[in-house]
Image (cartoon, rainbow, N blue to C red):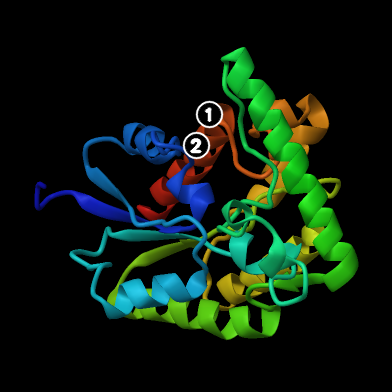
Amino acid sequence: MSDSKNMVYLLGDSITQGLGSKKVNFTGELSRLLGESYEVVNLAHTGTMVDFALQLLEDDKVRFAGEGDVCVVLYGNVDAQIRPSRTGRVFPRIPKRFQGGGMLMPRPFYSHTLVKRMGQHADNLCRKALSGVIKIVDGTEQWMPLESFSPQYEELLDGLLGLGFKVVPCSCVYIDEELFSGTPEQYELYNQRIYSLASERSLDFIDFYGLFRSQVEASGWDSCYNKDHFHPNGEGYRLMAERIAAQIKRTDH
């Protein structure tokens, strides 16, 4: 790593880390757009919330090296999502394979092989059925309610700013109400809070929720999302990279 390079740390969940063995995300495209004067380091981890980023700070994983260093913060997607309750009567009794993180969510993509694809569609139907039963019998939960999220997000912003980073706070992404009932409303509340905390610190906020909603309304879900209508596809990640790169370049002036 050249000492002349500015560091760009990406902090977030699976939206930022990417999915599957190849971990398709926007890191490579962002690096290309920013050029050789920047080094992009993706510290995101699937299923994590804002407290994970605070732990990264405590563990000295996010290191400030110079005045051009940037942290891009993309939390709220996991924190705010409305999920089937894990604490009722049904969840402990469903097959273990569906108890893992995200296994009751819709599948993000399917195999090109017919036999595998048929099995995956069957798997997705099981996820939907089990999720529906849990919601009816035991209700829903939110992993980090807004009253817990807000002070931790505020602490994260202040911690990064205190180290000297230029900070780029981002909204939750757009999400499908039909597949994630109740979550879009929560995302809007969390986005309002993120925007407020950013404005109080004179930070420019990237509204990915609005960006993706406009794209979906104009061209449909497949134009920028995987099949779960939550994780962006390649085109969605290109849009994210362009918006983040433009914001980072603005902070240079």
Residue named by callout 1: 234
Q: Position of residue 66 (x, y in %)?
A: 20, 64
Q: Secondary structure at mark 2?
A: helix
> Eyeballing the image, is 244 above or below 22?
below
Residues 170 and 184: in front is: 184
| Disc 2: CA contacts within 10 A as few (<14), some (14-19) or many (>=20) | some
Q: Residue tagged by mark 2?
A: 242
Amino acid on which the number 2 mark rests in the picture: Glu
Task: Give the x, y percent position of residue 101.
Answer: 56, 58
153 horizontally vs 195: left or right: left
Tell me which residue sits at (68%, 49%) in the image: 105
Which residue is situated farthest in the right direction here? 136
Left or right of 134 in this view: 127: left
Residue 243 lies, with reference to residue 209, above or below; the image says above
At a point 75% along the width and 64% down the height, the residue shown is: 84
Between tags 1 and 2, which lies in front? 1
Residue that appears at 49% across and 37% down = 242
Q: How many marks?
A: 2
Who's the residue at 41% across and 50% down the image? 248
Looking at the picture, tell me which residue is in the foreground, 8 or 139: 139
Q: Is residue 181 visible?
A: no
